[in-house]
């Protein structure tokens, strides 16, 4: 296992979760709902909210993936670590999608905490969230 993943396990930021597999569809539904909201916000030119909603769509898609492996996260950082370990390292997920998730986290923080956002970033986030959700649905068979 990777050092980062081991560290997240030790700090209990990633834990095994008995009910995880039962919650995969709920997370995918949340991801889909957030993506729809992001698209509506984009149409309304509310680019800040579109970015935030797109990120949370990606977050729920990623969460569905680690749930499908029987884990739960307690940190956005450790969620990304778990995705890399459980999916990228196993050849199941493209590293570019993890980079998109990492970028999404940064863009969400910039929009939410610093008021930094743009139409271009919002458009990119929607595209990334769509691809992430589609891939998560394929990988989980849902």
Image: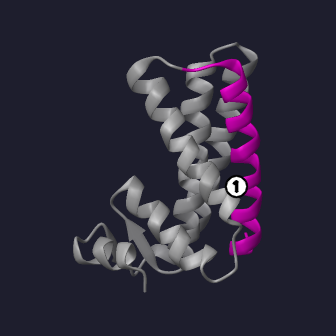
Q: Is residue 133 magenta?
A: yes
21 relative position to 7: left or right: right
Residue 140 in the image: x percent, y percent?
68, 73
Residue at numbered disc 1: 132
Instruction: Say if 57 sits above or below 74 in the image.
Output: above
Residue 46 in the image: x percent, y percent?
63, 15
Q: Which residues are magenta?
A: 117-142
- Disc 1 secondary structure class: helix
Residue 65 occupies which quadrant of the picture? bottom right
Instruction: Say if 36 sits above or below 3 in the image.
Output: above
Instruction: Say if 3 sits above or below 76 in the image.
Output: below
At a point 37% along the width and 72% down the height, the residue shown is 4
Residue nearer the viewer, 22 or 6:
6
Residue nearer the viewer, 111 or 23:
111
Q: Is residue 127 magenta?
A: yes
Residue 23 seen = no
Residue 113 in the image: x percent, y percent?
38, 24
20 relative position to 9: left or right: right
Residue 41 seen = yes
Residue 89 occupies which quadrant of the picture? bottom right
């Amino acid at each position: 296992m990777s050092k980062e993943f081991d560290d997240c396990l030790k700090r209990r930021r990633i834990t095994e979760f008995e009910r995880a597999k039962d919650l995969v569809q709920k997370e995918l539904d949340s991801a889909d709902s957030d993506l729809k909201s992001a698209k509506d916000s984009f149409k309304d030119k509310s680019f800040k909210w579109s970015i935030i909603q797109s990120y949370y769509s990606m977050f729920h898609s990623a969460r569905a993936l680690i749930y499908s492996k029987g884990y739960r996260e307690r940190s956005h950082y450790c969620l990304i670590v778990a995705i890399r370990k459980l999916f990228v390292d196993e050849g199941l997920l493209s590293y570019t999608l993890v980079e998109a998730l990492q970028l999404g986290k940064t863009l969400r923080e910039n929009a939410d905490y610093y008021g930094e956002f743009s139409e271009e970033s919002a458009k990119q986030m929607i595209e990334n969230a769509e691809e992430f959700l589609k891939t998560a649905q394929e990988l989980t068979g849902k």
